Amino acid sequence: MNAPAQGKETSAGVAAHAADFPILARPVHGRRLVYLDNGATTQKPQSVIDAEATFYAESNANIHRGVHWLSQHSTDLYDRGRERVRGFLNAARVEEIVFTRGTTEAINLVAASWGRQTLKAGDEILLSGMEHHSNIVPWQMVAEQTGALVKVIPVTDNGELDMAAFAELLSERTRFVGVCHVSNALGTINPVADIIRQAHAVGAVVLVDGAQAVAHKAVDVQTLGCDFYVFSGHKLYGPTGIGALYGRKALLDAMPPWQGGGDMIHTVSFERSTYAESPQKFEAGTPNIAGVIALDAAIAYVQEVGLDRIAAHEDALVRYATDALGQIPGLRFIGQARERAGIVSFVMDEIHPHDLGTILDMEGVAIRAGHHCAMPLMNRYGLPGTARASFALYNTREDVDALVAGLHKARRLFGMEQDA
Amino acid sequence: MNSFGDLRELYQEVIFDHNRNPRNFHGMEAATHQADGHNPLCGDQLTVYARVIEGVVEEVSFIGHGCAISKASASLMTEAVKGKPLDEVESLFKDMHAMLTESHPDRDLGKLEVLSGVREFPARVKCATLAWHTLHNAITLARETAKTE
C-alpha cells in the first residue's frame, strides 16, 4: 500500500469521527448498523447535512443574475465551492472545474461534446476491462455515432491492467483512453500517471474516472497530467446530485456546448446565440446550488480529518479484513492487486453473493452483492457477481469482525459449518 | 433452537435441498418452447425449456446460475408444472406471483408455499419470480428475454 504505516492510535483517531455521522447511530433489523457499502455511497457528517439545510434556511437565492443581496451571497458561496474543488484536485484554474450531477453525467458530457466533435470513423477508443458502465456506455454511443472503434485493455487474473497489452494496443489511431483511477469492483489502483504518459505519446486524450479514488487518496490533476478527471460528491461524504468534471482549459475552450439554455450563453436572439466561456458554457440552467455548498463542506471535512490519515486507516482495515476473511474456508478473493484502496471483493463456495447479502443484512451488515455495474469485468472472471465490502473513514475493526461473524452465520445456515 | 430468526422463514430446509440438488436441471433437445430469463439486479440467469404436447406440459427443465432462492424456485416450479395442462400452469403462475408479492394464497399450493417467506424480503422477490416469468414467456412464445423489471 502507498501510505506509510500508522500506529493504532491514528487509526482509532480517524474512526472516532464515526460520531460525526448521525445515521451510524440508527439500528437496522434491531442490530448496530455496520455500513460497508461506501463504494455505492458514503454517509454524511452533520456538518454537510447542516450546510445544505442552512443554505435553504438562510441564503437561498438563484445565482449569477440577481442584483439583490441574497443572490450575490449565494453566488459567492457557489463560487467558493468551485474554488474548493479546484484546490482539492489542484487544478491550475477555476475555469477548469465544471459542475455536473455526478461522474456519469460528467463522462457523458465529455463523450457528447469532445467525443462527437473529435472522433472520426476508424479512430480508436481504449477502455480498460474493469471500467464501470458509466465509462463504457457513453463511449459505445459515441462510437456508434462516429464510426470510432472501442477496444479493451485486458485485466489480469489478479485484477490489474495488462500494461504490456496496453502498450500494444496504443497506436496513432488511438484518440482516447478511458480508465478508472480505482476500480469499484476490485479496489485496484491503476497506474494512471504511466497510462497518461503513454497515451499522450501517441497524441491520445485521457479521461480518468476518479469516483472511487477521491475519498481514499490525494489527487493532483496537474501532476497526473490527465486531460479530464471526474468524480461524484456522494462518494466523498457529500450529497447526491452533484459532481465535477476537471478538463484542461485548452480542451474545454475548444469543445462545443452540451446542454443549451440560460447561463451558458452570452447573448440570445432568434437569429443567433453566442455562448459563454468555460465553465459556464457547460452549466446550463440553475445548478444544484445547495449541492455545491454541501460538497464544499464535505471536502472541507475530509481535509480537516486529513486524507492521508484516512488512507492509512483504510489501508490498515483492508489488511485486517483480508487476513480475517482469508481464514474463512471456501472464501475466494476477486482482485488481489498489489496496489488497492478501501475495497475487498470476494465469493464463497456454494453461497451466492445475493444470499450472503441477505443474511448479512439481517445482522445489520450492509455490503453490496452483484455485478457492481461492471458486467464486462464479471464476465471476464466468469462470475455473475461478487460480494463487496467497501470501507470509509468511520469503519472499524469491529465492523470487519461483524462481517466475519455474519459470513460464518451464512455458512452455518447453509449447513457448511456446525453451530459454535 | 436456532438463532437465525426470520432467515429461517426465507431459507427453509426445502430451499436448501432444491438449491443443492435442483430437480430437472438440464437442457432439452426436443423442447417445443423455451425462453431466457435474466435478473440484472443480481445476475441470476436461467433458461427454461418445456415440451408441450396437446396442451399439456409433458416435460420441463431449466439450466442457469443464480442465488439459492432463484435456483430453488425454478426447481420447485418444474416439479409443480410437470404433467399439468397449460391453463393450470398459467393459473399457478398468477397464484405464485400473488403469494410472493401480496398475500397468502387462497388455495393450497403445496410445496411451493415454502417460498411464501420471500414476501418479507422485497429485495429477493424477483429472484423467486424469475423462473415463473421465464416459463410464462416460454409458453406465450414471447420473443424477448424475460426481465423481472
Image: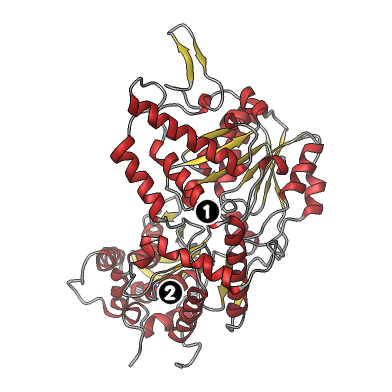
Give me the residue at 42% from left, 55% from top. A44
Confirm whether circles 1 and 2 share one chain. yes
Give me the residue at 42% from left, 56% from top. A45
Q: Can residue B47 be seen in this view?
A: no
Chain under numbered label 1? A
Q: What element carries label 2?
A: helix
Q: Where is residue A250 in the image (x, y as percent from the top left)?
A: 67, 26
For the residue pair B27 and A203, the one nearer the viewer reads as: A203
Q: Where is residue B50 in the image (x, y as percent from the top left)?
A: 43, 66
Q: Which kind of residue does numbered mark 2 sit on?
A: Leu
Furthest-top residue in this view: A271
Q: Is residue B53 above or below residue B146?
A: below
For the residue pair B9 and A273, the one nearer the viewer reads as: A273
Give me the residue at 58% from left, 78% from top. A325
Quarter containing the N terminus of chain B: bottom left
Mark 2 — residue?
Answer: A360
Q: Which kind of residue does numbered mark 1 sit on?
A: Glu
Give me the residue at 46% from left, 42% from top. A242
Left or right: where A269 falls relative to B80: right
The image quarter containing residue A253 is top right
Left or right: where A95 falls relative to A150: left
Q: Is residue B30 above or below residue A50?
A: below
Q: Position of residue B44 (x, y in %)?
A: 48, 64
Closer to the observer: label 1 or label 2? 1
Q: Where is residue B147 in the image (x, y as percent from the top left)?
A: 41, 55
Q: What element carries label 1?
A: helix
Number of on-image labels: 2
Mark 1 — residue?
Answer: A304
